[in-house]
Image: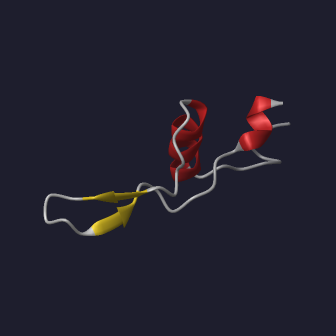
Amino acid sequence: SSPIANPVHPIELLATVYHSVGLNPQMTIYNHLNQPREMVKAEAVTSLFG
């Protein structure tokens, strides 16, 4: 496939990196003010993993 046929947003690439090292991209983390935040609001591009 090509980038033109299957465009991917940069945030999806970040989610894919997290996924590839075993982290859930939608995992809730807490900032320095103890406020909950999602790591990224995107799905991993799992088609890259066959």
Residue 35 falls left or right of residue 28: left
Looking at the rendered image, the quarter that the N terminus falls into is top right
Residue 22 falls left or right of residue 32: right
Residue 35 falls left or right of residue 47: left
Locate residue 38: give its quadrant: bottom left
- Residue 14 is situated, as x and y percent measured from the top left of the image, at 50, 43
- Residue 49 is situated, as x and y percent measured from the top left of the image, at 76, 31
Q: Is residue 36 above or below residue 50?
A: below
What residue is at 54 percent from the left and 35 percent from the top? 17
Question: How many tags in the picture?
Answer: 0
Q: Is residue 29 above or below residue 19?
A: below
| Farthest residue, direction left | 33
Residue 23 falls left or right of residue 34: right
- Residue 36 is situated, as x and y percent measured from the top left of the image, at 31, 67
* Near-viewer residue (28 or 1): 28
Looking at the rendered image, the quarter that the C terminus falls into is top right
